[in-house]
Each structure stands twice: as C-alpha cells, then as structure tokens.
Amino acid sequence: MTVGESLDFSHLYSEETKSRKSSPLKTCIHLFQDPNIVFLGGGLPLSKYFPWDNLQAESPLPPFPNGIGAAPSGDAKDTCVTTVPKDGVSKAGNTTDIPLSRALQYGFSMGQPELLSFVREHTQLVHKMQYKDWDVLATIGNTGSWESTLRIFCNRGDTILAEKYSFSSSVYAAEAQGVNVFPVPLDADGLIPERLEAILDNWNPETPKPKLLYTIPTGQNPTGSSLSDDRKKEIYRIAQKHDFIIIEDEPYYFLQMDAYEKDPSKRKAIKFASHDDFVNSLAKSFISLDTEGRVIRMDSFSKVLGPGTRLGWLVGSKKILKAYVQLHEMTIQNPSGFSQAIVAGTLNRWGQHGFLDWLIGLRQEYNEKRDVAMDALYKYVPSTPALSISPPIAGMFFTVNIDASAHPEFATKYQSKPELVEQAIYEKVISCGVLVVPGIWFKADGETTPPQPKESKAEPNPNGIFFRGTYAAVPLDKLQDGIKRFGAALKEEFGL
Amino acid sequence: MTVGESLDFSHLYSEETKSRKSSPLKTCIHLFQDPNIVFLGGGLPLSKYFPWDNLQAESPLPPFPNGIGAAPSGDAKDTCVTTVPKDGVSKAGNTTDIPLSRALQYGFSMGQPELLSFVREHTQLVHKMQYKDWDVLATIGNTGSWESTLRIFCNRGDTILAEKYSFSSSVYAAEAQGVNVFPVPLDADGLIPERLEAILDNWNPETPKPKLLYTIPTGQNPTGSSLSDDRKKEIYRIAQKHDFIIIEDEPYYFLQMDAYEKDPSKRKAIKFASHDDFVNSLAKSFISLDTEGRVIRMDSFSKVLGPGTRLGWLVGSKKILKAYVQLHEMTIQNPSGFSQAIVAGTLNRWGQHGFLDWLIGLRQEYNEKRDVAMDALYKYVPSTPALSISPPIAGMFFTVNIDASAHPEFATKYQSKPELVEQAIYEKVISCGVLVVPGIWFKADGETTPPQPKESKAEPNPNGIFFRGTYAAVPLDKLQDGIKRFGAALKEEFGL
C-alpha cells in the first residue's frame, strides 16, 4: 500500500485559528543556538540562575516481577534511578537525559526531543501509522488538549458531536465556549454508527454541519462501554462522507482487560507470549485507521503513570499540530520541564519494552479490580429485571442501569419522573456511606432541532437511569465494602 | 484604616464565564478524603501505581554567600537537598513536603497547600494587601494566566488597553480572540496617566468601554521603562473612575536595580541592611494600592527560578479567582505536581528570608549585567542625536531609540518610511552577528477610532524607531561583544 500525505483540514478551523499570528520573537529563537550570533533577542534567563541540580527519582525496574504496585527497595536489583544533572550528559537507555539547563529554559514548544522521540516510537509501535506526515506534540494532559481542540476548530454557535453520555467537563468546556454538543446514541459497544449516519444524512441544511466528533472509544466515561473495531471503521467512513474530524480521547486505552468471566474457577488471566502479542491484543485505534490526517488522538500519562505529571501528547498530522503549537505558544508554552525530565528520564531507562511491561502490569491490576467489582455487584445488587450490570472490558468505570419505573413510589412520590428517582437514589447511596454518581451528570443534552427522524430500532427505555462507579480509586477491600453499601441502598430504595 | 471586602466585578465577565458551569464531579471530590464514605465517584488512579518515590533535587543554601550563580558542591554547608517521598512526612522548613502520592494525584485545583501558603505569606510580606478577601492561585506561568484572563473577561469585539509597545505574544493572544488592543502612549516612566484619562474621557459612547488594562509596570517589555509609584496611583484612580480592571503582568518585578551611574568609580552597589530594607526598596505594586479587588497580579517563577518550572501564581480577590479556578478545571487542572513538589520543597526549606536572599542576589546579578550593557552601549553606539539610550532600572531589556530620518538614505532608498529603515537595520545587525529585535514587532496597533483628541504635549517623533536588546540571555563577555557588533552595524548604516 502506498502511504500518502495528510489532507488539509484548515477549512474546518475557527476564526480564532485562522487569524492567529505567531509571535515574530518565535521566528528568531532558533538563533539562540547559533554560534555565529550573539543572542540579545529574547528574555531568556541564564541557566546559571536556575537553582536546581541533580534531580533524582526512584522507580521500579522492568519487567516489574512483583507487580507494578511493588515499591522499589532502593536496591539496584529492583530500583531504577533517574538522575538528571543540570548540564552535561547522563544516559537514559539509548538516549540521553534532558539536562535541567534545557528542561527549565524556554524553547521547544513541541516538547523536549528526548520525550518526543520516545512517544513517537511508542505511537508507531502501537498504532502503526498509515500516513507519512504525522507527528506527536507534548501536552499538559487531555483536559487541556480538549479545550485547545475546541479553540482551534470551533466558533460560538458551532455544533459538535459526542456520545450521548460523556465526560461532563468535556461537555461543559464546549458549552461554555458557546458550542452545541449534539448527543449521539450509544450502547454497550459504544457509539452506534447507523444512528450517527442518520443524524448527519438528515442534517438541517441551513445549519453548519459538525466539524468534530468527540469520542472516548475505550472504557468510555461514564458508560464503561468500548467501541468495537468494526464500528470504528464505519464511523471513519462516515467522517469522510460528512467531512468531520474525529477526536479520540484515550486516557483509558491501556486499561483494556479480558472479558469478564462470572465463574472464578473458569477465569484464566491472559498471558502474553510477547510484547507483540500484547500490542496485537489492543483495540484498533481511530488513528491507526487514519489515512488522511482526519483523526486527532489525545493520549495522556495521567491514568498510566500519574495525573500530576500533567503530561500527555497529541498524535495527528503535522499540518494540524502546527495550529496547536501556535496556540500553545500563547497558553501553556510547553509542559513542565521537571515533568518532562523525570518522565522522559524514566521511560528512556525503562525502554519501549519496559514501558509495555508496565502497561501489561497495569492491565493485570485493573483486570483484578474489575473482577472484584463485578463479583461484588453480582453478589450485592439485587437480582431483578429493573437493575442490570454490563461488565466493562476497559477503563475505570462500571455502571448499574436502573428502570426507574420499577421504583415502588415512581408514580406517586416521584410523579413518574425518572430524574427524581435518580436524585433520591443518589441521596440514599451517600447516606449509606458510598459515593457513586448519577448518569444524568454526564448527559450531553445539546440542541437537536430539527428533530431527528425516528429510528426503526427500539428506543431505549425512557425511564432508564444509571449510576457510574469506579473500581480505580480504592483498594479491593474498600471496593467490595462500597459496592455492598451501594447494593444495600438499592435494596432499600426498591423495597427488595 | 478599616480593611474592607472586595467589590463584585462579575458585570465585566465574558459571556463564556457567565455561562460556565462547574462539573458536578468537582462538587463531590472532597468526599475522597471523607473516612465515612467509600469513594467510587471518580477516576482517580491509586497512588500505589504512581511509579516514583524519593524525588530529590539539590539547590544552593541561603544566604548564598558566593552569589546565586554558584553551583552547590553537594556538601551540606552550601547545599540544600529537597527530598520528597511518595508517602509520609518529610519536613521542609516550618511546614511539610507535598508527598508524591498527593502531588501526582488529581485534586487541589487552587494548587497544593504547601505551595500556596508560602506564596501567600510572600505576597503579604511584599505587597501588604489592603483588603480582606484576597488570595493566591497557582498557575502555569503568566502566558497562560494572560490567556485565561482574556477568556474570563473578553468577548469578541471587546477592546482592552495596553501600553503602545507591549509583549507581542500578549497582544497577539488578544487579537486572535477578536479583542481589540487599544494602544496607550508611554514614555521612560511608563504609561502616561493623562493620556490614558483623555482616551477614556473621550471614549465613543457607542462602543463598549475597555474592561481591562494590561500593563507590565516593572522593566516593561519591550521598552525597559518602569512605571513610577505616583503614576500607579493616578492610573488606579482612573480605573475606578472608568470601571476597568488592572492586570499587572510582573515577571520582572524582582529584577529591580540601582539607577545607572555612568562613572564606574562612583558606583556603589546598594547593600540592604535587612530584608525589610530590601522589600521597602521595591516599587509599589498596583495590587498593594488596591482596596477593592480591582487589580489582578500575575506573578511567575519563570524569571526568578526558571521558565521550565511552568509555575506562577495570581493574586486577586477570591471572587475573581473563583472564575479562574472554574476555567482551570477545564484547561490546565493544576500545575505539574513535580514542579509544585520541588519548588515548594525548596522554598519551604529556604524560608521567606532565604527566598528574599535569593532575590537580592538576583538583583545584584542583573544590576551588574545592566551596567555592563550600558557601559558597552555608551562605548560602542555612536554618539549622535539620532541615537539615544535610556538606562533601565528594572527588567531584562534595554532599547536604543533611533531617529530614522537621520539615516543618509532615508528620503531616497527608504522613501521616507521609518519602517523600511528599521527593517534594513535589522538585517544589518543580523549580518554583523548579533540579534536585537525591532520595536515594530511589539507595536499594539489596534483600532483607535474615533480618533482621540490631540494632546497639547508634543507628539513623539513620527520617524522614531527603536531596537530592543537584552542583557539577560548571555554571559558578560558575549554581551559586550554583541553590543559592539550592534554598534558597528549602526555606524555602518548611518555612515558614521
């Protein structure tokens, strides 16, 4: 297959992006490194005045034989020590560290080269990119990346597409910018392509078509669903047909698991024969299907190393990433130099295979957490048709779906309003000493006029509500205890 | 004097801020710490899976007897070692460190308490705040803070006020957002209050009045001027009269110096008898004059510790900071946990006085750099009325002002256009092996219709151009060499 160049999507840019000028100062900052030029051009403090030297951090050592949660002892046999001096060279795997004199200086809007080269290689390894001019760009995490994406593409009054239930901060960020979030139905396998296509085929020709689809394909937040590979191909085709960009927000991508098996005796944790085996087991990403630079992938270290790194990366065409760099120069400049130095220092010492070992270890941990949560849910949530559980195959979240009309006081106390039942259950679970959150918090309820045509497919139960829980945030014993309390709350509410 | 509460300035907020909702998930995140609640509410990874422990960095030890540029030897007598464990308590001065299990977790949108308490105390020490409900908020530096400020207050089509020559990235950020930057004249003492007042007194009543004044009072970028304390009082009064917010962008605040003395034999570096003496020597900030929460101060560690910390803070009223927190929750979340842990760890070990020692040391360094630059300018820039130098008393920048009409080819080759002379000189200085940047790069040339009334005061020379250089970015020998090259370029251009 011939591998081509990305297309130009600048017709989808916002007014803001179209009018953004790069600071002329940025056009001459490369002269800082030119030995023939004395640089009196920009306010760069001398690195001599940066007070820090010999930055150091300990981490466990691949292949993490005692699991990724085992603390390093400090002993060389299980401890990886990242030491980053202020100047000069220290080795990190096949590359060198980012000296602090550079990490803590201005410059490198794309991110430090030692970080980018690791992330670029990782991306190629996992996603096997299908066009030439793709690249990666360091970010401060997906929350920031999504806000930047909205600024780059959307004007006030624009509409974007999103899963009907989606991460509320993402929805609210769009709404605050005056962007309408059009909900697209989803089920246990994620976004429904036929519904998406029907929405766009019947789009009111008098209103501008959506420029973006925002999706969390893997371990969707809040529903826990994962989009199947076949549906992704369909959605990509629809994106080409209706000329929109797909934004895949993938913080949970590496929290993919075995399918849940109810009978513990039949559970066999998948053992990967090789790193390739592991990579091949992963869901195909949208970016891996992309042949024309129509997908922007938002990746983050938040869920796999730690949220406080405030470090992530974008994958996309160089053309589009240029617009992000121009925006970053006026917003974040670049992620923290300390974060870049420590994360790149650690990853380059671990190597690509070491990082995959970490991700395999993480998968095992989440697999176990998910199993413990599911076991507890099946044990403590009363078995009745009004309450249903769909075991997730990725991510941090589970949901319990509830038919509100089955509540004994639905028609009386709650006036047949499912949202009132939802609120009552929320208060009950808190009073039982557990926090799970109502699905309504995640509802993308943007303008959908003109009304979309009715689908032949049965509409979901109009009295359906759900609660989202997570197995990520607490240890296993607390998780079981929490779900027990949740079950007790449901029993009480439904008089079971 | 009775100290009062801040006023409400929400009438100045943008449409975006007025419509921004906080994510409901943020309303329950505090339950993560509640011992009576099992938290299954949010996607917080267990800190057990954060791979780092024993973060460590070395810095010099106050009072920095060998100057702030002297590297720590590693020996306890001149080396401060900041060590931050993953869990548990390590002491930093009068407080404790931010354990990595917290620094690398979600939460604390305002910033980590150990950082905020240091910055709050520092702010009170330096600015002696005059109203009750002020606070500080951790940021990723002033570039990001300014962009957030624009989002919080401005709609497309709004106008803001700024110095006629200003930091180009700040101007371009506003322009990209569709915000008109109205230039206010400035001279060697900064913004001219009479001109500002005349502009506002004569404002076209049919167009909305400016909501913001953006100013860099100390070591202004690019002119190097510093706003006098008296002018600040005047400008604050005008802000009250015309109801706008003052945004003081103060990255160079602690780079204040002695007045330049041409004769080296007469130079006496000011020695401060005490830390109080040093603090009292500093220019009065706008925030120190503020009695009603009308000022937002943007402070940053970029110029005093290192740009790559990507860490700064805002000072303002709690009411207004709340709008920033809501925006941050959808953008940056919070600054890097590594940056916060290392910076707070170091500063809390140094203590308030240790940090002031650092700033006094920094002042000495910049004082010397400024002197070397001025000496070289007076030596190498040809002495002719067409070329003038005004020695700065703060910041990183010097300017050489040029009467373009004195160029021998002004009327011929350059068709009496000063901007063509400016471009020619720029190309000449580069070819002479030095980079200084043309003033035109910094010109805020927003819409000023209807034309403002002519001032009685003489207008500046319409053929006046200038170049900005910095003494910050290179060591002293290179600085002298660069200015020599700059002088040679000017000599050649002007046929002197």
Image (cartoon, coloured by chain):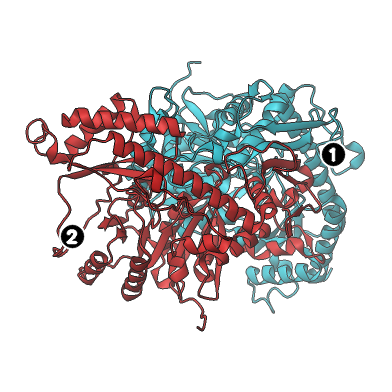
Chain colours: A cyan, B red
Does residue A217 lie above or below B316 as drawn? above
Query: As rendered, which of B281 and A459 lies closer to the eye?
Result: B281
> Residue at left 88%, top 53%?
A477
Outermost residue, bottom direction?
A: B2
Disc 1 target residue: A70
| Residue B433 in which image quadrant | top left
Image marks 1 and 2: residues in contact by CB distance under 8 Å: no
Query: As rendered, which of A386 and A397 lies closer to the eye?
Result: A397
> Residue at left 46%, top 67%?
B287
> x, y percentage for residue A159?
43, 52
Outermost residue, top direction?
A: A1
Q: Secondary structure at mark 2?
A: loop
> x, y percentage for residue A68?
80, 37
Query: As rendered, which of B483 and A396 lies closer to the eye?
Result: B483
Outermost residue, front direction?
A: B265
Does residue B321 lie above or below B66 as drawn? below
Give the residue type that dot 2 points to. Answer: Thr
> x, y percentage for residue A425?
73, 69
The C terminus of chain A is located in which quarter?
bottom right
Disc 2 target residue: B449
Q: Chain of mark 2?
A: B
Give the residue type that dot 1 points to. Answer: Ala
C-alpha separation, residue under disc 1 versus residue under disc 2: 67 Å
The reply to whether residue A460 is in sight is yes
